[in-house]
Amino acid sequence: MTELLTAAQMRAIEQAAIKSGAVTGLELMERAGQGVVDAIFAEWPGLSNARGPAPAPPEYLEKSEQKLRAVVLCGPGNNGGDGFVVARLLHGLDWAVEVFLYGDAGKLPPDARVNYERWLELGEVGDLAKALTSGLSSEGNNLVIDAVFGTGLTREMEIPLSALDGWSDLYESLPNGGPHNVAIDLPSGLCSDSGRRIGESGNVFFADLTVSFHRLKLGHVLDDSVETCGRVVCREIGLPENWRATRAVKWRDVVQLMRTPSDLDAFHLSKKSRAGRPNKFSYGHALILSGGPGQTGAARLAARGALRIGAGLVTLGVPPSAQQEAASQLTAIMLKEIETADDLSLALKDSRINALCLGPALGLGRTKPLVVAALEAGLKARPTVLDADALTAFADAPGALFALLHKDCVLTPHAGEFARLFPDIAEKLAAVPDKGPAYSKVDATRDAAKRAGCVVLFKGADTVIATPDGRCSVNAALYERSAPWLATAGAGDVLAGFITGLMARGFDPMQAAETAAWLHVECALKFGPGLIAEDLPEQLPAVFRDLEL
């Protein structure tokens, strides 16, 4: 995994590095500016041949202005200092550069002030607020660089940067392309810790490319991030690799981002092929409860997912009235008659059953007693996934469910189910933030997990997974891992089955939830457009082969 940092954590890491003497603030600023320029040229190679004249410009440009052009918008902090560096570097490549500052130059931080003065030796600095009021335009510019606030914003922006969106659509004929909107670290107007727009206006800079440094921030993968950040790249700026040792950052509080195959526990996933003399019970026996007639599909999807991900046996607990329907659709999955709580209690006397899944289309009328039977004291506590109806059934009394839960449970709510179980937390998350750091989906999931006393997986394109003690990870199906095909009926049921199957195999709840969420997205990416839920489990063998398991 890699780390997702808050603004405060990033500041602490930088300050610790500077204090240690490993690097100076000016060096970090210079490297950041160079990183932005390098990222721009990597994203739009047509802009990198900047020393020669551009192709013939549109008629509205004077012949003397036949250079690649950029507008750099600088703010009152160190993000603005990065912007001055970018302006100077582009100028050195023979670009025509205009620079505007928001705020009082006399109040710039020391390092930003140095780079402001360096720019003054090359060009002028306009007043950004006045320029926007008088109709600052991108006409004729290849780049618009947002270096106004970055990660430092804690209040609603007063300057209308959102009005700059749409320039690219207006001037598609500009030589070498553009205007391209580029944000340094984070689009101004977006909260670095939550990915939410601050204030009722929702005023934010819309970037085509966002260049971050050292590590991505939470705001790059949560909430409004995708529609405001464009493409996100992260550049190293030479911070020491031992930054984790700084006492200013509590390592356990840092959120993890799952984004590469190395995030998976390959040993546990591949141990089926490495075991000595196993049998099916060596890999666990998962029991998944089904709804009645016409309602068995969701549980069958979950069961197929549990079996494909490696559970040795999977049994579907089905009411007698739905036995024939289920049997006609299943082969490798076993069936057992389970309709009532007493039936379930009897079935659970089989100690070989070591993981449960309740909820997918189980039926609200019969769900509560079944959940109670699965979790009540006196029975051996088994790893249990509660999804869908198993969550909604307790909407009128969430506390009754929380009293039953144990540490080996995993709750998998989507936004609606989350709001029913944790209404106060959901209300806090839905409120428009008037200042930053804003309450985030990470905060909400951590609070929910602490209240429930077990792992909570809060579904979405920005799936957040948290434990009661605050450990947290994000599985972001965004940017290069965007998988919009997962927005299909039954996909969540398959995810519940993946988690159940992994827990049957011996994964702990957090590890099972993280691994299942990552594989869920990989299966969708492997299949591509046209995906339906039935396709997801069938992609696992190919995904495992790609991972060389």
Image (cartoon, grey):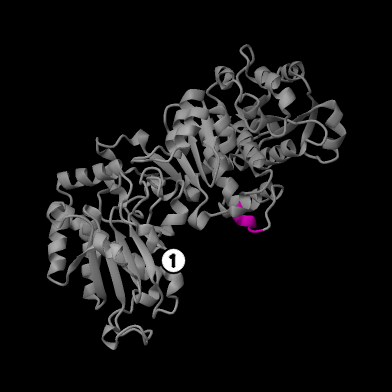
Quick check: can you spot residue 46?
A: yes
- Is residue 527 on the magenta stretch? yes
- Is 37 left or right of 350, judged from the image as shown? left
The residue wearing badge 1 is 166
> In this orientation, which residue lies closer to the viewer: 51 or 277?
51
- Is 420 left or right of 93, judged from the image as shown? right
Residue 87 position, x and y percent, is 24, 68
> In this orientation, which residue lies closer to the viewer: 418 or 245?
418
Picture residue at 63% right of the left edge, 11% below the top: 378
Q: Is residue 57 above or below residue 475?
A: below
Picture residue at 79% right of the left edge, 27% below the top: 336
> In this orientation, which residue lies closer to the viewer: 145 or 353?
145
Residue 492 position, x and y percent, is 63, 41
Q: Which segment did they paint magenta?
A: 524-529
- Is residue 371 on the magenta stretch? no
Q: Residues within 10 Å of mark 1 (few under 14, many from 20)?
A: few
